[in-house]
């Protein structure tokens, strides 16, 4: 006999075990230390910045725009798999409680994110409102009610296959959420809040009426679930091998000039392989770009001299550490083992690519500091970055690969 409660519990427990297993690799000791340092630095500068914020600062507008995004973005985890559109489709009418539990769990996750987001912005709100922190709980309560409406509306929208419906829904809800939050954070009277909240109820009633005769869009729900898990697997793959991750290759024709600089020859086989893998496969190139841009942004707000060089080294380490999985990217491909070349050329090619990537990042970060007008710090950062990159790619990696 079919038991939807048992099915949901098994799917949920399986997902939690999977997330927990890979999270141990993601949040290892090295990354935790770096994250704690970055969070501590960000908190310190945020606190110092708040001291300079004038009372006329548009805190309500900024909070409405950012938290409005958190309210509007409301994906729902259904824990569905590819086979479900065949085996569970005939049981759709008996899965009401299954999807209700999925919606509830998804709302709990979103509520936690909103709690963190509001916690970040409430000091700024208190700064321009005479140090009033007492509004945090009332704000959180009201926002969670609006979030619940957004989650329910998002579930109803998934009954439509038209892309324009999904786009317009996100646009309309974001506009409503932002206006509501602006009135809320501006301490407007409840007479201004109620009409805006009613618009969400009207939107929910509209979708409720128009989806009454529609069935679940199983292929869409499964595709969204696979996309979310693929994103997580891609992150976890930076720290360990993930067998379930499907390789994605992007052409990136505009980077073809890089390959033309590598000579053709038997000894250059792995150089071609690793460079092409870095630029086109997985998310290695995107990772390098994101970490570099994030570090440049952090350096822009940091002004304590040599501390900038230390932050640059942290990000160079993060980049190098998260590029290590590139070494095993092709380990399950038999044809690579058939190359009639020496095995040590593979390690040399990997080290060469890693060195060049970290050298380039060191140069870019030094230029970013130089643009700020701190020439001596930029030179120190460049020298320290190049030295650290050489040590990481030629000493640390050698020991890491052997282990």
Image (tube, grey):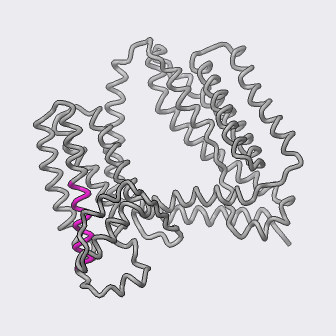
Q: Residue 220: percent from the left, percent from the top?
A: 70, 56
Position above or below: 205 against 290: above
Residue sitting nearer the eye, 266 or 1 = 266
Q: Residue 201: percent from the left, percent from the top?
A: 78, 30
Q: Is residue 268 magenta?
A: no
Q: Is residue 187 left or right of residue 195?
A: left
Q: Quadrant of the C terminus?
A: bottom left
Q: Residue 303: percent from the left, percent from the top?
A: 22, 31
Magenta part of the chain: 345-359
Quadrant hosting residue 387: bottom left
Q: Residue 122: percent from the left, percent from the top?
A: 49, 26
Q: Is residue 32 left or right of residue 305?
A: right
Residue at image point 55% right, 37% down: 115
Position above or below: 305 against 181: below
Quadrant hosting residue 94: bottom right
Q: Is residue 351 magenta?
A: yes
Q: In this view, which residue lies farthest toward the right?
A: 213
């Amino acid at each position: 006999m079919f038991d939807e409660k048992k099915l949901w519990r098994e799917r949920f427990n399986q997902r939690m075990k999977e997330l927990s297993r890979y999270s141990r690799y993601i949040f290892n000791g090295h990354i935790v230390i770096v994250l704690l340092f970055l969070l501590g630095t960000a908190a310190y500068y945020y606190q110092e910045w708040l001291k300079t914020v004038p009372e006329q600062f548009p805190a309500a507008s900024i909070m409405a725009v950012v938290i409005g995004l958190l309210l509007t973005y409301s994906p729902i985890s259904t824990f569905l798999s590819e086979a479900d559109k065949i085996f569970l489709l005939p049981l759709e009418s008996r899965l009401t409680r299954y999807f209700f539990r999925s919606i509830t769990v998804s709302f709990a996750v979103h509520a936690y994110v909103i709690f963190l987001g509001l916690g970040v912005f409430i000091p700024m709100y208190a700064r321009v409102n005479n140090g009033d922190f007492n509004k945090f709980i009332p704000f959180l309560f009201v926002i969670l009610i609006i979030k619940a409406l957004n989650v329910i509306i998002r579930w109803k929208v998934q009954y439509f296959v038209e892309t324009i419906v999904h786009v317009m829904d996100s646009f309309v809800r974001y506009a409503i959420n932002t206006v509501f939050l602006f009135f809320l954070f501006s301490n407007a009277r409840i007479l201004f809040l109620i009409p805006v909240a009613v618009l969400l109820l009207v939107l929910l009633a509209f979708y409720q009426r128009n989806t009454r005769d529609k069935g679940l869009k199983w292929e869409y729900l499964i595709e969204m679930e696979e996309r979310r898990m693929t994103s997580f697997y891609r992150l976890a793959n930076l720290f360990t091998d993930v067998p379930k991750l499907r390789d994605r290759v992007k052409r990136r024709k505009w980077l073809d000039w890089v390959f033309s600089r590598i000579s053709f020859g038997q000894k250059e086989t792995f150089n071609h392989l690793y460079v092409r893998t870095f630029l086109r496969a997985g998310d290695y190139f995107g990772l390098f770009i994101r970490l570099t841009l994030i570090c440049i942004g952090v350096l822009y707000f940091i002004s304590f001299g040599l501390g900038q060089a230390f932050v640059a080294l942290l990000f160079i380490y993060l980049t190098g550490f998260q590029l290590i999985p590139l070494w095993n990217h092709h380990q399950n491909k038999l044809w690579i083992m058939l190359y009639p070349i020496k095995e040590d050329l593979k390690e040399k090619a990997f080290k060469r690519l890693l060195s060049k990537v970290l050298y380039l990042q060191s140069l870019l970060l030094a230029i970013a500091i130089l643009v700020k007008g701190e020439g001596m710090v930029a030179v120190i950062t460049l020298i320290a970055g190049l030295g650290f990159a050489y040590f990481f790619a030629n000493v640390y990696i050698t020991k890491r690969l052997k282990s």
